[in-house]
Amino acid sequence: MTSGQQLRLYNSLGRRIMDFVPSADVVGMYSCGPTVYHFAHLGNMRAYVFADTLRRALRWKAIPVRQVVNITDVGHAVADSDTGEDKIEMAAAREERSVEEIAAFYTKAFFDDTTALNVLPADVYPRATEYVPDMIEFAARLEELGYTYLLPSGLYFDTSKSPGYGTLALLDLEGQREGARVEQIAGRINKSDFALWRTEEPGVRRVMRWKSPWGWGAPGWHLECSVMSMALLGQHFDIHTGGVDHRELHHVNEIAQSEAYLGDGQPWVRFWVHNEFLLMNNAKIAKSSGPVPRLADLVEAGYHPMAYRLFLLGGHYRSQLDFTTNAVDAAQATLRRLAGRVEALRPLPAAETYDAARALLPPEDKVAAAYLEHLDAAIAADMATPKILAALQESLRDTDISAEGLRVVVAAADALLGLGLAGLEVREVDRRRSAADLDPAEVELIERKIADRTQARMDRNWGRADEIRAELEALGVQVTDTPAGPTWELT
């Protein structure tokens, strides 16, 4: 039993909000991870902040979780297709590096971003390349059961033998099969059939290749998630997360192959929870559309990573969000205000669960207790983070709440939102470039110009002093004259 209000989640399987009651002592949670061929963009990162919020909601309800986030370092073809170049191999050719170097570099970049966004680490980050033998065994079992057929291009799953195919996407069976794909594959029976194994094309030797019963090649993209999740969470588990784009194809295919493999008539995963798209200029952000902003671009522009997290939490995870400069400016300003107001309340207590927060409340502070119930109701109602933010900001303005009660409310809200308010300083939010960001030669140039300007002022050569000030401003340097001498900072 969990304390507080019953946690309810929107289950994409059936498109309805349901009570979430764990089926085991530890909830298994699988989150589709990155394909490490390129930097993750802001739209990609929404999925991991959303999954992290779900982790925090479960922790709040004292529900133990084991989360797996896969690292796709093989098998994902360009355009999510069953034929053509592998994304990792194509990136290696483009950047003139090995596939191992590409995977390692972009995996590190992904972890840098999740760390900056205060995403709780998953329990396991399996690499697809580590599980290829298991994938071959999985596909061979499906072949034994009669769910597959072999073509020169690979081993394919016959979706006509999957009675519930397409249920997750809420598409009619024939419509899904006729409209699922546009790529033409010779010999494919149904347009919705997908590759379990992709064999090498004649005369083409892949960089990443494995020997299989169907020839040299590599696994299909969908196969890895079924295999790794079962290996690490068990044949059935409670929660599978990902972006809403996966709901229409990738997750549909995962379900089909997994339930065929298990053959027990039971749903493979109980809850499918998806976040909506991030938009830019009212269009979905995608790498295929050209250069897209990264978290590092925001930081370079002077925004704190938590401002982006706050921007995401300001909308419900199932609502599309339009990324605009005005929106992230507003998030940055809100973060600055929150950091400033929370500074005086530190240190914050540990209030990561509902029961812990309740126990910390001063018994006589009914106002704080009411706020805590607001937080609990919001997170329980399908993770209504905008309501949590509203309650947090209202509590910080409330003159009727005690100082200790406010500390508990802020700590609880912070545990749910993951903004790091317990240690976030206003100066971090307003971070500008400093001398520490410059190399020694740049610092030497700036200080030499400032010394020249000082000498010009001493010589009463005001024109030359003004020229040097203009030169410094062009370098992004602001000089302030003080009784103790000039000081400077980067603008």
Image (cartoon, rainbow, N blue to C red):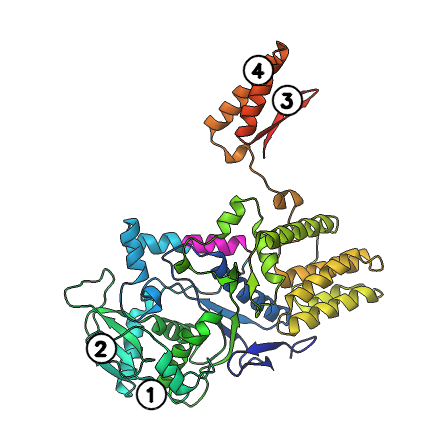
**Label 1 amino acid?**
Ser
Whichever of labels 2 and 4 marks the residue nearer the N terminus, that label is 2
**Label 3 amino acid?**
Pro
Between label 4 and label 1, give the one nearer the viewer: 4
Q: Which mark is residue 119?
A: none
Whichever of labels 4 and 1 marks the residue nearer the N terminus, that label is 1
Work out which quarter of the rendered image holds the C terminus and state it. Answer: top right
Percent position of residue 45, x then y: 50, 60
- Which residue is at a point 74% across and 70% down the rendered structure image? 373
Whichever of labels 4 and 3 marks the residue nearer the N terminus, that label is 4
Q: Which residue is mark 4?
A: 464
Q: Residues within 10 Å of mark 2 (few under 14, many from 20)?
A: few
Q: Which residues are magenta?
A: 108-118
Q: Which mark is residue 186?
A: 2
Q: Is residue 275 above or below residue 335?
A: below
- Which residue is at a point 65% across and 74% down the rendered structure image? 381
Q: CA distance from mark 2 to mark 1?
A: 17 Å
Q: Which mark is residue 486?
A: 3
Percent position of residue 61, x then y: 64, 72
Residue 111 is a magenta residue = yes
**Label 2 amino acid?**
Ala
Residue that extends furthest to the left in the rendered view of this protein? 203
Left or right relative to 332: residue 370: right
Q: CA distance from mark 2 to mark 4?
A: 76 Å
- Which residue is at a point 41% across and 78% down the rendered structure image? 252
